[in-house]
Image: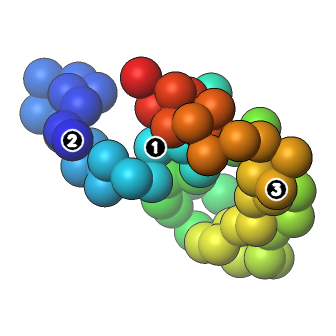
Amino acid sequence: MVFEAAPDVRIAIQEDGLPMIAGGVLDYESSHRGRGFRLANPAAKSACGCGQAFYADFSDQEPAAAAEMAD
């Protein structure tokens, strides 16, 4: 799935990964740690210090409910 974020910016996401980032906000950040895209993800229960990986717990949801989040 490809989203057009700006006239010259397209973001490609695996369709089966959409439930893991549903409701998230993608932003570009430039700080003392570097520059790049950051995802503020409400589904993330924990994340690594670098911000590149996160853990989301969907164990309390039925499989169909997680799939509906992608729609």
Q: What's the CA distance linking mark 3 and mark 1?
A: 16 Å
Q: Secondary structure at mark 3?
A: loop
Q: Give left or right: position of 6 versus 13.
A: left
Residue with the mark numbered 1? 18
Across and down, in percent, residue 44 comes to 78, 53
Give the residue at the far left of this rendering.
8
Labelled disc at residue 42 = none
* Front one among 31 and 56: 56
Mark 1: secondary structure: helix
- Name the one closer to the observer, 18 or 28: 18
- Sequence order check, earlier mark of 3 and 2: 2
Density class for disc 3 (Cα within 10 Å; few <14, some 14-19, many ≥20) is few
Quarter of the rendering containing residue 66: top right
Task: Decide which of tag 1 and tag 2 comes sooner along the chain.
Answer: 2
Q: Is residue 42 left or right of residue 3?
A: right
Residue 40 appears at what percent x and percent y? 69, 42
Give the Cα distance between marks 3 and 2: 25 Å
Q: Which residue is mark 3?
A: 59
For mark 1, does the 10 Å Cα neighbourhood hold few (<14), some (14 to 19), or many (20 or more) residues? some
- Labelled pair 1, 2 in contact (Cβ < 8 Å): yes
Instruction: Report helix, strand or loop for mark 2.
Output: loop
Q: Can residue 44 be spotted in the picture? A: no
Residue type at tag 3: Ser
Question: As shown in the figure, which amino acid type bears the numbered disc 2?
Answer: Met
